[in-house]
Image (cartoon, grey):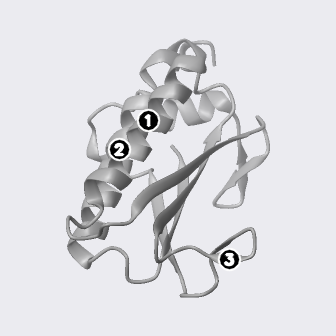
Amino acid sequence: MPNIVLKVPSGSFSPDARSALVQKVNEAAAAAERIPADPRKRSLCWVVVEEVAQGLWTCGTADITAQVLPCIAIVYVPAGVLDATARSRYVQAVHGAFKDAALLDDRRALATSVILQEVDDGAWGVNGAIWTLPTFARVAGFEHLQHLVAAQ
């Protein structure tokens, strides 16, 4: 049940490409977090695409967006959901989502930064209440964490 913020240079992805990007990022989240193919559970994956205006994306002090397509994904996920293998697969899949969604006529080199931000247990609020890992496991259906639900 992640919250994902994607930052891309303004105008770099067409509406169809943005839609494909969001779809593939959702698929990456579901696979890495082992969320079942239940639409109610998958709807808990929130993705926000923020477009950064020209001239506001710099590396060092230079705007490199003419040569490079920089893309950032910040993924907030409850601590305890991902192990090292899942983190690695998640990063690869999100990079692949950016790569697959990039416009074919865009000749810039793709550069991605995927940040997996694991939120400490008891530090995530949902609709005014604090949720813990067993609650996330129950609601999101994390297949590998159902033993936490049974223990409640």
Q: Foreground residue, 147 or 98?
A: 98
Separation of residues labelled 1 and 3 (CA atoms):
27 Å
Q: Position of residue 136 (x, y in %)?
A: 57, 36
Write the residue at 33% across / 73% down: 13
Occupied quadrant, residue 42: top left
- Above or below: residue 25 compared with residue 91: below
Query: How would you rate the neighbour count of disc 2 (Cα within 10 Å): few for under 14, some for 14-19, many for 20 or more?
Result: some
Q: Position of residue 74 (x, y in %)?
A: 60, 54
Q: Foreground residue, 11 or 63?
A: 63
- Above or below: residue 152 compared with residue 56: above
**Given the image, on which type of amino acid does mark 1 rest?**
Gln
| Secondary structure of residue under mark 3 | strand
- Above or below: residue 43 compared with residue 142: below
Badge number at residue 92: 1
**Given the image, on which type of amino acid does mark 3 rest?**
Ala
Name the residue that disc number 3 marks: 62
Q: Position of residue 45 (x, y in %)?
A: 44, 51
